[in-house]
Image (cartoon, rainbow, N blue to C red):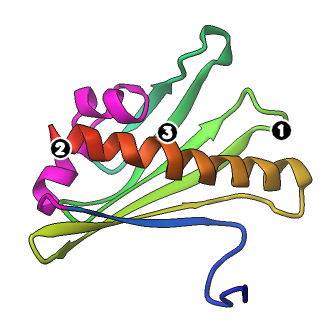
Amino acid sequence: MIADPQLNPAAIELGTFLPQPPEVVWRALTDPELLARWLLRPIGFAATAGTRFHLVLPEATAGNITCEVLEVQRYEQLTFSWTYSMADPAVRWTLDWVLRSQGHGTRLLLTQTGFDIADRRQQMARNAMERTWKRTVLPRLGQVIHR
């Protein structure tokens, strides 16, 4: 397998096709009740740039993830920071969701950046997060949208 020189090895870049229009996918990305079903329960979330919010982790002792909405283009893009201060050292990533109309559905692209792959633990975290997005989170998003 030849590595694609266009891909950033310090980022997670995933795409999926959803058979629903961008408006439906957007709702799943921005409705707090729906977010809780496929990602994590948000506290204080609004799809408005500058909004600071928390994502509640299921383990009571794990703390919360602190986030800030960085960019919003309705039905097209949602970008927010993701800071987990309980990690040693604390980590700060950026999640960027891009929606593109494709046929009768939506091409959804997720990019997660901020990994320091020179750090072995960060490289392991990057690989674990990529597996989690692929195997668990994105399939759950598809299930929530399908309902």
Q: Amino acid type of disc 1?
A: Pro
Pointer 3 residue: 67
Which is more foreground, mark 3 or mark 2?
2
Distance from the alpha carbon under mark 3 to that under mark 1: 17 Å
Q: Earlier in the sequence, mark 3 or mark 2?
A: 3
From which residue to which does the magenta span run?
Answer: 19-46
Does the CB distance between marks 2 and 1 fall below 8 Å? no
Does any portion of residue 129 appear in the rendered image? yes
Q: Amino acid type of disc 2?
A: His
**Where is 116 relative to 42, above or below?**
below
**Where is 118 relative to 141, above or below?**
below
Q: Quadrant of residue 32?
A: top left
Q: Amino acid type of disc 3?
A: Cys
Pointer 2 residue: 146
Does the CB distance between marks 3 and 2 fall below 8 Å? no
Q: Quadrant of the N terminus?
A: bottom right
